[in-house]
Amino acid sequence: MNNSSFTHTLYSGATYHTVREHELLHKSQRVNHVKVLFTFFVPSGGVNTLNRLRTAVLQRHGIEAHVLYLYPGSGMQNNNSTPVFTASSDEEIHSLIHHHHYDAIIVTSDISMPGRLRSLGYNGRIIFEAQGLGTREHAMETIQMGVPYLQAHCNAAVIPPTDHLLELFIHMCPWLHRFVIPNMLDTTTFAPISVDIPPYPVLAWVGRLEHNKNWREYLMISSEIIKSVPEARLWMFHDPTLANPEDEVMFRHMLAEYGLEDRIGIFINVPHSQMPTFYSMIAASGGIMLSTSLLEGFGYAVAEAISCGCPVLSTDSDGVRSFITHNRTGKFYPIGNVNAAVSEAVDLMHNIQLRDYIRIQGRQHMAVSFSPDRYAISFREMMTALSIFF
């Protein structure tokens, strides 16, 4: 059998017809109740955002969804009414899964969890979800290490429409059913809003101080932009509890080296609900968001910024291709090419006609293509394919 026949692309952007959505939504109100659990390491970053969004929308589509984090984290402040558990011991996890009798468990990134669940007596469907696996090399290492566990314990894998992840699963796990489902975005909350305008253009960055987020390049590019736009200032949003200690030390050294210590505002653990205000302020200031990642499975911070009308300059980090088209919904620069990045950034800040066009097109694309209801319909179709819905 051709390997590609195992890949189910359940939804492909705006080509999914509205009539079909209504049919499936109506059907979802008539079928049996299903309960699922999503597991991840800590409540942080894009996975935490995704879990909050999808548990809420799945509830509206007849699927009760819970979340299990192995360890507590700053993202717990963002929780909605979804049941969220924090447990790391076998006893606690055993009690949870046998109390709730989940029809399926979706294990995000944690390659050891499927085997652990089986050893604790869980016999339902286990789906491995590839999110937040970092660079291509790290993703390859994780999947390679997990091959025997995926083969022994998992019924399927679900991935976003990200080329490097799909390619790795096709070649390394050709026997495993693959479901390709784009992530969702809350474009109602993440929308342009009226804000106070900062007195300087902002060069913003959102991420973690670690290798894949490539924060060094953000400082290098920003220090060069300031030579052309001397009034610009840096805003950096990050969670120091997730920072690599070596990167944190190097970050302080580089700030001093580039003379940026008095030009940067550092925002720590900003509640997710407040980010539309900041993205709107960045946009209103005449500034931009810089995304310097080596690789992204999706890139939630970038998507949310674009949805708020904040123009983005990004590396071509794979996952962001689903919502950035150069000079249409955002801008790309070649990773490592600081001069090209500076040129694109200054163009995005000073070419008002192009800037306005990118802001409008970006917002429209996010609103049309990443609807939570579409995600729920695709998720339900995956459940049907795995004989959880009939």
Image: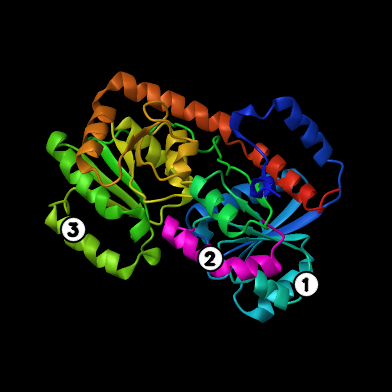
Residue type, mark 3 in image: Met
Prevailing secondary structure class for the magenta stretch in the rendered image? helix
Q: Nearer the viewer, residue 161 or 383?
A: 161
Q: Using the numbered discs, state the Cα–Cα distance from disc 2 to disc 1 in whole angstroms.
A: 30 Å
At which x and y percent is residue 219? 23, 50
Q: Secondary structure at mark 1?
A: helix
- The residue singled out by tag 2 in the image is 144
Mark 2 crowdedness (10 Å alpha carbons): few <14, some 14-19, many ≥20: some
Q: Residue at x 55, y 40 (%)?
A: 185
Residue 349 located left or right of residue 5: left
- The residue singled out by tag 3 in the image is 254
Residue type, mark 1 in image: His
Q: Residue at x 77, y 63 (%)?
A: 102
Residue 52 located left or right of residue 91: left
Q: Residue at x 54, y 35 (%)?
A: 187
At which x and y percent is residue 129? 60, 56
